[in-house]
């Protein structure tokens, strides 16, 4: 877990911290955002489930019965557009960037630990962490960057697991994990039933990035070059959404993918098992209450 936490990467030219959405553009392949807590994932998957051949087995650390879908893309490839359509469809989406920002808010454990280790001088007047000040510290001192990672990454993992479990109990057929560095790290892909890449052709990606961030061509090319190329990620993904065209074309592809995932029988037996257990417990509580009241 050597990578800087999401949102604290900084621009190579300006030396200023950049936003969470641009973090993937600064990290080279292999420098992971999240190293999965295998012990926690295994605990989540230990319940016996029935598979398609009718036999029973434990889900195991592959989480195949949890039906997780990993979603990623590249800078300016249009991942936010795809996520917006998925949310419109009512899909369960867990955003790693959002969680990374939430866990350092004042009411979280990670916030208290960060203030303890780095002092109150990194705080803004409203009590929140001054991301620029903390960024200056961790990029000047690698050991402090590792310390910050050791504080934030476990909290990010725990929050992701909590949300996965919540959607599992609620009966969602699949859960989407929006992880910018999914293919760069290659550590989380083994937990995904499917992986989805939001792709666009290189000229379109360059043009969009220049326009969106008001960059020169050289600056935009440098940011794109710092990432694993989309064409390489395309070979690693099980599904590709081509966002090179207009929004309506992208939307049609997302709708088609959603329909295919909804029709999948993965996760069905696990949901039935959980539903049966919950219904049984609810019935038992009801009978006990009736007997107690009468």
Image: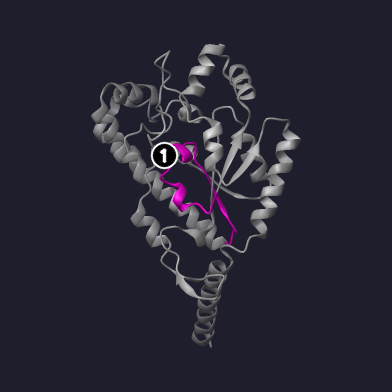
Quarter of the image where one finds residue 103:
top left
Q: Is residue 7 left or right of residue 71?
A: left
**In front of the other: 129 or 49:** 49
The residue depicted at 55 percent of the width and 76 percent of the height is 54
Residue 180, horizontal then vertical, whole percent: 49, 36
Quarter of the image where one finds residue 57:
bottom left
Residue 14, horizontal then vertical, whole percent: 42, 13
Q: Secondary structure at mark 1?
A: helix
Please give the range of residues in magenta: 171-194
Question: In the picture shown, does residue 153 fall above or below 123?
Answer: below
The residue depicted at 43 percent of the width and 30 percent of the height is 7
**In front of the other: 169 or 15:** 15
The answer to if 175 sits in the magenta stretch is yes
**Is residue 229 at least partly visible in the picture?**
yes
The answer to if 28 sits in the magenta stretch is no
Q: Which residue is mark 1?
A: 185
Q: Is residue 265 left or right of residue 219?
A: right
Quarter of the image where one finds residue 145:
top left
Question: In the picture shown, does residue 173 fall above or below 55?
Answer: above
Residue 127, horizontal then vertical, whole percent: 38, 30
Residue 158, horizontal then vertical, whole percent: 39, 50
Q: Quarter holding the N terminus?
A: top left
């Amino acid at each position: 877990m050597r990578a800087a936490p999401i949102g604290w990467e900084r621009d190579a030219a300006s030396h200023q911290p950049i936003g969470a959405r641009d973090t993937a553009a600064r990290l080279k392949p292999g420098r992971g955002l999240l190293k999965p807590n295998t012990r926690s994932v295994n605990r989540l998957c230990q319940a016996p489930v029935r598979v398609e051949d009718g036999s029973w087995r434990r889900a195991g650390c592959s989480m195949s019965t949890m039906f997780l879908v990993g979603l990623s893309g590249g800078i300016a490839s249009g991942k936010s557009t795809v996520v917006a359509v998925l949310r419109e469809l009512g899909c369960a989406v867990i955003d790693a960037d959002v969680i990374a920002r939430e866990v350092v808010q004042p009411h979280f454990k990670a916030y208290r630990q960060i203030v303890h280790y780095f002092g109150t001088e990194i705080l803004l007047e409203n009590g929140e962490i001054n991301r620029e000040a903390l960024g200056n510290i961790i990029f000047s001192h690698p050991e402090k960057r590792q310390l910050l990672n050791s504080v934030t990454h476990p909290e990010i993992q725990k929050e992701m697991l909590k949300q996965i479990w919540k959607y599992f109990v609620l009966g969602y057929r699949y859960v989407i994990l929006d992880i910018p560095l999914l293919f760069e790290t290659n550590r989380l892909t083994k937990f995904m039933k499917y992986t989805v890449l939001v792709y666009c052709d290189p000229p379109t990606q360059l043009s969009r990035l220049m326009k969106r961030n008001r960059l020169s061509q050289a600056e935009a090319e440098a940011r794109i070059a710092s990432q694993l190329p989309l064409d390489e990620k395309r070979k690693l993904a099980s599904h590709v959404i081509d966002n090179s065209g207009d929004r309506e074309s992208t939307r049609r592809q997302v709708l088609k993918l959603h329909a295919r995932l909804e029709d999948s029988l993965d996760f069905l037996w696990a949901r039935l098992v959980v539903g049966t257990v919950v219904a049984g417990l609810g019935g038992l509580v009801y009978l006990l209450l009736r007997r107690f009241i009468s």
